[in-house]
Image (cartoon, grey):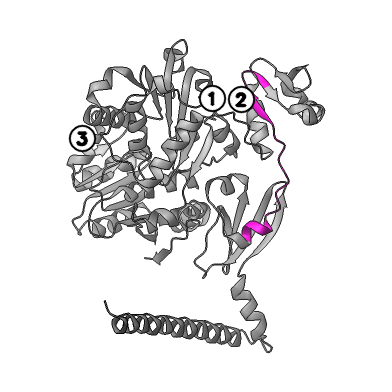
Amino acid sequence: MDLEEVRRSFSDVLARLDGYIRELQAERERLVREFQDRLDLVKVSRFDFEALKEFFDEPYVVIPKRKDEYYVIAPRWLNFAIGWLERQTKGYNIFVVNRYVVWLYEPPEKIKQLLKFPEALPLKVFDGMLLTGKEYQAKAWEKYRQFLAARVGEDRIRIKRGYEFKLIAKLIEDGILPFVPRPVEDEDLRPWIGLNLRSYQEEAWKRFLETGAIGVFWSFGAGKSLFGLYALARIKGKKLVVVPNLTLKEQWLQRINQYIPQWKDEVEVVTYLAYDKVKDREYMLTIFDEVHHLPADTFIRLSTIKTKYRIGLSGSPFREDGRENYIFALTGFPVGLSWEDLIRLQVVKVPTFKVYIVKDNVAKLRKLEELLRLPVKTIIFCDSLEFGQRIAKKFEIPFVYGETKERLEIIRNSDVCVVSRVGDEGISIPEIERVIEVSFLYGSRMQESQRFGRLMHTKGEAEPEHIIIMTQEEYQLYNKRLYAITERGFHIEVIVV
């Protein structure tokens, strides 16, 4: 390329850049005009354009909520999401941001500067001891006395027997990541190249090798299970996978047979109800799938099983009872990736979202009949067994519920099927193009996020669609479940039938 060609190329780039700048200026002016028009509609007589410019520089407000938690309030028309969406007004989204959000997803720099989290104490938990250093031993003894047995020397404190996880949970609640890395030993690894990891999966694997215990909190469809399979293949010896239901157990067993059949005898897959079965066994690696279940009183004993390394997997690391700190406490160093990053990397697909408001269950059936005229692979989620049987009979389609055998095969082989809550979590059917909800667990945001997450796995060319059919009463009582969608920055079209 000669000098004249370089000049022309550079001039073309500058011309395109000038065009982009003009477009941005035009869009800014359009927004200002639109905002002024809106103000005119509500008869606002005075309007400060300079203040509006400042608003667009920082179109949100950060307000302390309680210790180590903040409200971040932003206009609903702004494509902005952070943390957990607590509630909505007609004009504003009100998010809650805590340390866990910051650990998992890097917030915008301006917001980060406004989040005044206090300096965390440099405390660590290791081998039954709270490691304090000389400087913080007295302060730690006073602050966490209920979990501690006795001071040992000048720089550590012995933890009461059986209180280690409770102490870790309290430390995490106070903003401290108290884990001491236990790197994976070379002798515990085997070479294997059966799966190609994406760049962020390679980073997570590197983090696991450095620490020996991580919680992987990626969105649905981002490859958490494949990452788990990779770990099962690379770590030698006996391994355990814990899942919340039989559907996921079936899926893990199928994938183990598909990807790592040569080591299937090394891996045991059980549900969270199987503590008595595994409590006296020892494992090299334990994977807790859908690890947000682990803090439940019924399942938390599983965290005490003897395992050298551990990995927690979840696309929704929050709980309705607020015990998020235990999710982190029971897994290890958190590894997260924002939805925006996964969408930018084209790892997941974003569905379109629609809510149809109807009169009653009869109207739900009529709407369902109308929707099913479009022949795409569909899961109809229905918590009510009675209503699920009714739908299955009317449309002559399978109903997958607790007593169903070979659940995954039925779902895979059916163009349309009804599924109870046994299909809420973890199942990956890449051919699914549409999810329709007709019955659900009240206002559960967890369930809602899990259900639309089934579409994040889709590999089809068409845009996936998530549809919820609610009565007016259900919409009024349980619309907070929809926050699981809008807090990710996704738009919902609400249609009154």
Find disc 1 in the rendering and name its residue: 300
Q: Please, what secondary structure does the residue beneath circle 2 have?
A: helix
Q: Give the crowd class for mark 3: few <14, some 14-19, many >=20 residues within 10 Å.
A: few
Q: Please, what secondary structure does the residue beneath circle 3 have?
A: helix
**Which picture quadrant has residue 261?**
top left
Kindly check if marks 1 and 2 are in contact, taking CB atoms under 8 A apart as contact.
yes
Find disc 2 in the rendering and name its residue: 165
Residue 156, how many percent across, how many down?
Answer: 73, 22
The kind of residue tagged 2 is Phe
* Residue 273 versus residue 4 in the image, above or below: above
Alpha carbons under labels 3 and 1: distance apart: 31 Å
Alpha carbons under labels 1 and 2: distance apart: 10 Å
Kindly check if marks 3 and 1 are in contact, taking CB atoms under 8 A apart as contact.
no
Q: Which label sits in the foreground, 3 or 1?
A: 1
Residue 117, how many percent across, how many down?
Answer: 70, 49
Find disc 3 in the rendering and name its residue: 409
* Residue 279 located left or right of residue 121: left
The kind of residue tagged 3 is Glu
Q: Earlier in the sequence, mark 3 or mark 1?
A: 1
Q: Quadrant of the C terminus?
A: bottom left
The residue shown at (70%, 59%) is 63
Q: Give the crowd class for mark 1: few <14, some 14-19, many >=20 residues within 10 Å.
A: some
Alpha carbons under labels 2 and 3: distance apart: 39 Å
Residue 163 tag number: none
Magenta stretch, residue numbers: 111-129
Q: Which label sits in the foreground, 2 or 3?
A: 2
Residue 345, how many percent across, how many down?
Answer: 36, 55
Q: Which is more toward the observer, 446 or 380?
A: 446
The kind of residue tagged 1 is Ile
